[in-house]
Amino acid sequence: MDEVIQALTALARGRTPAFDTIGEDSDDEEVKELKQAVGLLVKSFADASDFISSLAQGRLDVEPPPKNLLISPFKQLRSILLHLTWQTIQVANGDLNQRVDFLGEFSDGFNSMVDSLKEKRVVEEELRRTHSELVEANENILAAIQYASIIQTAFLPNMPVMEAELGDFFVLWNPKDVIGGDIYVFRPVPNGFLIAVIDCTGHSVPGAFMTMLAGSNFDRAVDEVGHAVPGLVLKRMNMLMKNSLNQTLAESPSDDGLDIGLCFVDRKKGELVFSGARISLFHAVGETVHEIKGDRQSIGYKSSDVNYDYVNHRIDLTTDAAFYMTTDGLLDQVGGPHGFSYGKRRFKEFLHRHAGLSPAEQKYALEHALRAFMGDESQLDDITVLGFKV
Amino acid sequence: MFKEERTTHGFQWEDLGDIQLGRPKLGPMTLVSVYRLMQYTLRDVLATKYDIDTANAVLVEAGTLAGYAFCKNVLDVRLDFDAFVADLQSKLKAMQIGILRIERADMDKMEFSLTVEEDLDCSGLPMSDETVCDYDEGFIAGIFNAYTGKEFEVKEVDCWASGDRVCRFSVKPKL
């Protein structure tokens, strides 16, 4: 009996007593039966204790001891946890229809998490679909721009014609976005030629639209007022551009226009006549560079006065004279160690330093200088630089 | 129809009839005790008239028939396994047959360990140190047969009647 009492006391205190010796050495049958029953209890307790300890450590792989009624609730818990593990794996594999409904607040949390994943998946699907549509739209736009580039390039002056008439010249034409708002114009006329750079409002597609309008209005202006007085051409262009965009009316939805630097080279007279709207002419004689500033009125805007007379600047042509015009894309480009703009001073210094080079060599040097100046900065605007010797 | 002599099974799901038509006042529901009254008296007669093994075998066979028809008529066998299990869990719960859970699923060997909590057949029975859900063994085997086209062997490992709180079934392909 003492052994039984000690064993039961140990069990009550959560300890597994040694039970091998219990129930084997009594003569009293009732005591023997009692000891055997206690022995069975001790073994069941020991097995249960081991199993529950494993469960407490999260070890769901431990099989429960068979036919041990002490652990029935724990077997149920293990079953629930195993199923929960399986459900979690299903969720991880993408099955967001799993729901838990037997673990109180944990169920709420788990189901909430799965619902969030489901919503996230819906959003991701929508994003994927939208992205796919955007990619397709972007591809279509890029294809259209590429084709527009072909048209805009075809619209520019024919190089062989320029080479035949001009001889020594360079053109640096760098749209910011494949197509742009800058163009240059070359038109042979009796006794010489007209040459211009035009900087229209905007770049990319809207800029390209403007260049089409600018080019056709330029031709019309020359046809209507003649080529000999560039200032008159600009005045005429001003009116034509305003009319084309209905910008004579205050309520017109647009307010677009252009800047232009236009030269008429009269070989017979040996002179160059320049007129500019916010674009200067840089005149280099040897290493000396002069700037002839364009007028401070742009062309075509609502605020542009149709009665404004642009100034004509006459320059006698000398054998070593070179002429340059640039749109503001070059001058306003930022770069360098401090992020300042390229500016007129830097451009004049460049022309001064490279005065002895041929136009083709000057173009190469300018491209190189610009790339070095820009560094990691992206191109801010369309860039057009024209240089020629007469 | 129901009382014709036969040597092959003739049961069809349609034999259950139109319950809505037949019970417009009482509706389709009844008590678990009514269900168990039928099953356990039937089991008792079979065991008495024949023997325990025969009674068990009859219940397994009936369960298999029921499970097969249940799967074909209530579940969607076109679903992939995970979705099929979810559907099965949902239907068993909705029809108050039990709360099915997957403990383990080895898809390569097609071996599974399932538990059914609040089993219709046994939850709440007095403890008798035996597993009694023979009909469920057949029911589960019938479902897996109908879903996979293969025969399965289902053995109840734990039961309320054997002292556990959930019924646990081991499911394996029949060799």
Image (cartoon, grey):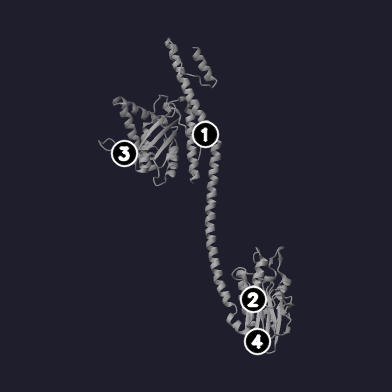
Circle 3 is placed at which residue position?
B11
The chain under label 2 reads A
Amino acid type, residue under disc 1 in the picture: Gly
At 53% across and 19% down in the image, what residue appears? A10
How far apart marks 1 and 4 lie (CA) works out to: 95 Å
Q: Are marks 4 and 2 in contact (CB under 8 Å)?
A: no
Q: Is residue B17 visible?
A: no
Q: Nearer the viewer, mark 1 or mark 2?
A: 2
How far apart marks 4 and 3 lie (CA) works out to: 106 Å
At 65% across and 83% down in the image, what residue appears? A194
Circle 2 is placed at which residue position?
A361
- Tell me the element at label 3: loop
Residue B122 position, x and y percent, is 41, 29
Q: Are marks 1 and 4 in contact (CB under 8 Å)?
A: no
Amino acid type, residue under disc 4 in the picture: Gly
Q: Nearer the viewer, mark 3 or mark 2?
A: 2
The chain under label 4 reads A
Amino acid type, residue under disc 2 in the picture: Glu
- Choose the circle earlier in sequence order: 1 or 2: 1
Circle 4 is placed at which residue position?
A192
Circle 1 is placed at which residue position?
A58
Q: Nearer the viewer, residue B75 or A73?
A: A73
How far apart marks 3 and 2 lie (CA) works out to: 98 Å
Residue A57 position, x and y percent, is 53, 32
At 73% across and 84% down in the image, what residue appears? A314
Q: Is residue B72 left or right of residue A79?
A: left
Q: Nearer the viewer, mark 4 or mark 3?
A: 4
- Tell me the element at label 2: helix
- Choose the circle earlier in sequence order: 4 or 2: 4
- Tell me the element at label 1: loop
Q: Nearer the viewer, mark 4 or mark 2?
A: 2
